[in-house]
């Protein structure tokens, strides 16, 4: 069983800082493994526990510093790691990212059975990269995956948590899964140990290795572009009152009544 | 028109499992009317998948909505949504009719479908937009929150169709439409080369009713961890009842088992925009705020005067929920 695990390093969104001009401050913001991807990793490792001869190859696209994250995943029990990295990949939207990662999988792990991604990344939150990869590889996809029900060497059965309920589906390989968060914290011991993980080679894959043209990757290869980015500033009044309980009740009553009157 | 070939707006008409047109379709339609008129009155068309003969049930409603054309794919296989069939058939349709804008509701189904279509069409897709407009060059300007809602980005697309998904509840429905002589088109298609390997084994409904009262509520009172326990939520319900409001909750309250997940408001819950939103014992995490900040008037009751909810509340009441609300009910009861 060959699994491609796709993960992303993201800025810690609980640690966002703003410059005076209301632009995002990028320096000094901590990078973390996208929380959804931690569950995707857990899911892949659960499969490895259940099915012998499972080999997990982690793919990430990003700058060189993403190697630390890859090492940690190796220490958790993943087998190989690929860093898809090239200056020319910068500025990619989900289309270009999906295309690049799909090409890397096609090049380095053409006989994969399963691709596992996190459902969302907390920075962009588009939920698009997984389906884009599946589309470029023209394979089946199952999104919003919650639980593993059954797995064998031909097919996998999972539950999906959707808007309107829970669906149970079965699909034969090859397939791409997008994993939701679990209701518990991922808590695996570093079975391979940090030392072992440090010894492993991380394969670096650049534009040449993928055989893509510069105009098909990164900002150039992206159909969408950001024309404007701005801080989300509320248009509410932000009036604060510190009053006695009686006065608070009166204020509350007035405000509720003013809405009721407008509707009458 | 920016490009001679590409014209008109296409909207994906999602059906619920009970065969109702999903509310997000009406919201997208309303917005499309505005966009179409800014583009000089282009056509607004829809695409829908149904089981055979079901389309007749929708004929009149589509006509009353003033749609120009409805592309209908009918088959017994379309009883359930299929990523493979729907995406490939829509790709063929779009290549044939060449819309300049293609909008899809950001339901779990829409978010599964849209990126499959956009990648296959080699075009761009902006997910989860909160604002759509036409810029001075006649392009779709799609605005969306990123970084957990702290940053807004306006995104343009270099290719056609310009695609976007929008979450249910983000746009309002208020138009009255002119009835039209809508054309119903049944495109020829075949399943050649298509194979859906995903088999649906079963489905368990999680929503008590397909109509979530939060969608149409004029007043919402929402509770967070400040309400502490079941008693707190019971008090919240009494309060809601006394003013004819619908109850909502934060994710923390849902996770603590104090409220069902169907009433969770925020990034991973519902987006609401009532006339009045009363946040009780809610700290105001950005993930909660993105789901309710478009409410017309926001009142917050919180005993911590530094709680972030006060930054976005029109009326911030610093005080204890367990003192203010019982007193309020007492006064009302008299
Ligand atoms: C990826 C992701 C998605 C998320 N999605 C959502 C989402 O969709 N919706 C959502 O709500 N959250 C979401 N969250 C969680 C969010 O970050 C917060 O943890 C959550 O909103 C906090 O809920 P709360 O305000 O009820 O609780 P707390 O943050 O614990 O706040 C409780 C508040 O009650 C006040 N209080 C205490 N006692 C009283 C009293 N007696 N009277 C009045 N006030 C009192 C306190 O001062 C405090 O401000 C998400 C988080 C992540 C990481």
Image (cartoon, coloured by chain):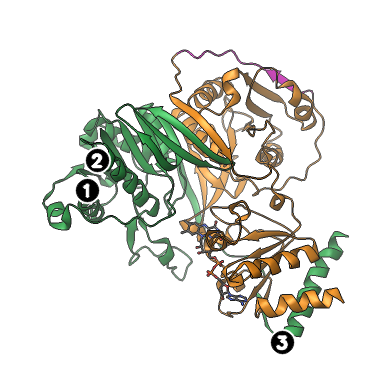
Chain colours: A green, B orange
The residue that mark 3 highlights is A244
Confirm whether the magenta stretch covers residue B184.
Answer: yes
Confirm whether the magenta stretch covers residue B326.
Answer: no
Quadrant of the displayed image that contains ligand 1: bottom right
Indicate the position of residue B110 as horizontal and vertical percent values: 55, 37
Q: Residue at x 51, y 36 (%)?
A: A167
Residue A253: quadrant of the picture: bottom right
Q: Residue at x 67, y 17 (%)?
A: B185
Question: Magenta segment range?
Answer: B181-192
Q: Position of B157 compared to B75: left or right?
A: left
- Image: A77 above or below A132: below
Q: Position of B157 compared to A49: left or right?
A: right
Residue B18 numbered mark, or none: none
Q: Helix, strand or loop at disc 3?
A: loop
Residue A77 numbered mark, or none: 1
Q: Earlier in the sequence, mark 3 or mark 1?
A: 1
């Amino acid at each position: 069983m060959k699994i491609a695990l796709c993960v992303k390093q993201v800025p810690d969104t609980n640690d966002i800082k703003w410059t005076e001009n209301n632009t995002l401050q990028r320096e000094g913001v901590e990078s973390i493994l996208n929380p959804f991807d931690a569950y995707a990793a857990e899911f892949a490792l659960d499969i490895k526990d259940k099915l012998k001869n499972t080999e997990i190859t982690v793919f990430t696209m990003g700058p060189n510093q993403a190697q630390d994250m890859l090492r940690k995943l190796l220490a958790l029990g993943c087998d190989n790691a690929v860093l898809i990295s090239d200056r020319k990949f910068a500025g990619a939207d989900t289309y270009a990212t999906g295309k690049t990662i799909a090409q890397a999988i096609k090049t380095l792990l053409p006989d994969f059975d399963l691709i596992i991604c996190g459902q969302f990344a907390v920075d962009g939150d588009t939920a698009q990269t997984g389906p884009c990869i599946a589309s470029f590889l023209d394979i089946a996809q199952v999104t919003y995956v919650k639980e593993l029900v059954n797995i064998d060497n031909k097919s996998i059965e999972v539950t999906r948590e959707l808007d309107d309920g829970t669906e149970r589906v079965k699909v034969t390989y090859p397939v791409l899964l997008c994993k939701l968060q679990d209701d518990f914290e991922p808590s695996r011991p570093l079975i391979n140990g940090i030392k072992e993980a440090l010894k492993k080679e991380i394969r670096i894959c650049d534009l040449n290795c993928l055989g893509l043209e510069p105009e098909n990757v990164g900002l150039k290869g992206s159909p969408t572009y950001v024309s404007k980015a701005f801080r989300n500033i509320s248009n509410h009044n932000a009036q604060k009152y510190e009053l006695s309980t009686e006065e608070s009740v009166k204020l509350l009553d007035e405000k509720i009544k003013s809405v009721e009157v407008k509707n009458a | 028109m920016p490009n001679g070939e590409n014209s008109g707006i296409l909207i994906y008409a999602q059906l619920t499992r009970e065969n109702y047109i999903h509310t997000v379709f009406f919201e997208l339609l309303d917005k499309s009317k505005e966009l179409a008129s800014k583009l000089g009155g282009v056509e607004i068309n829809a695409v829908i998948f149904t089981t055979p003969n079901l389309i007749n049930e929708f004929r009149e409603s589509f006509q009353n909505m003033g749609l120009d054309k409805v592309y209908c794919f009918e088959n017994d296989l379309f009883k359930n949504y299929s990523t493979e069939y729907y995406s490939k058939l829509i790709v063929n349709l779009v290549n044939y009719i060449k819309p300049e804008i293609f909008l899809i509701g950001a339901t779990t189904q829409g978010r599964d479908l849209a990126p499959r279509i956009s990648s296959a069409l080699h075009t761009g897709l902006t997910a989860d937009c909160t604002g759509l407009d036409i810029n001075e060059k006649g392009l779709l300007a799609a605005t969306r929150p990123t970084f957990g809602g702290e940053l807004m980005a306006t995104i343009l697309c270099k290719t056609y169709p310009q695609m976007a998904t929008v979450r249910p509840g983000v746009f309002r429905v208020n138009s009255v439409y002119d009835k039209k002589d809508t054309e119903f088109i049944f495109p020829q298609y075949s399943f050649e080369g298509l194979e859906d390997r995903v088999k649906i084994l079963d489905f368990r409904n999680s929503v008590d009713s397909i109509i979530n009262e939060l969608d149409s509520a004029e007043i919402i009172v929402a509770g967070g961890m400040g309400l502490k326990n079941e008693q707190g939520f019971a008090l919240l319900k009494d309060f809601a009842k006394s003013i004819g409001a619908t109850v909502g909750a934060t994710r923390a309250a849902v996770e603590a088992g104090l409220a069902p997940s169907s009433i969770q408001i925020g990034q991973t819950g519902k987006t609401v925009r009532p006339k009045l939103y009363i946040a009780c014992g809610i700290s105001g995490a950005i993930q909660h705020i993105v789901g309710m900040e478009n409410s017309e008037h926001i009142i917050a009751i919180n005993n911590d005067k530094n709680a972030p909810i006060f930054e976005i509340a029109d009326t911030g009441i610093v005080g204890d929920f367990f003192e203010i609300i019982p007193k309020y009910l007492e006064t009302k009861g008299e």
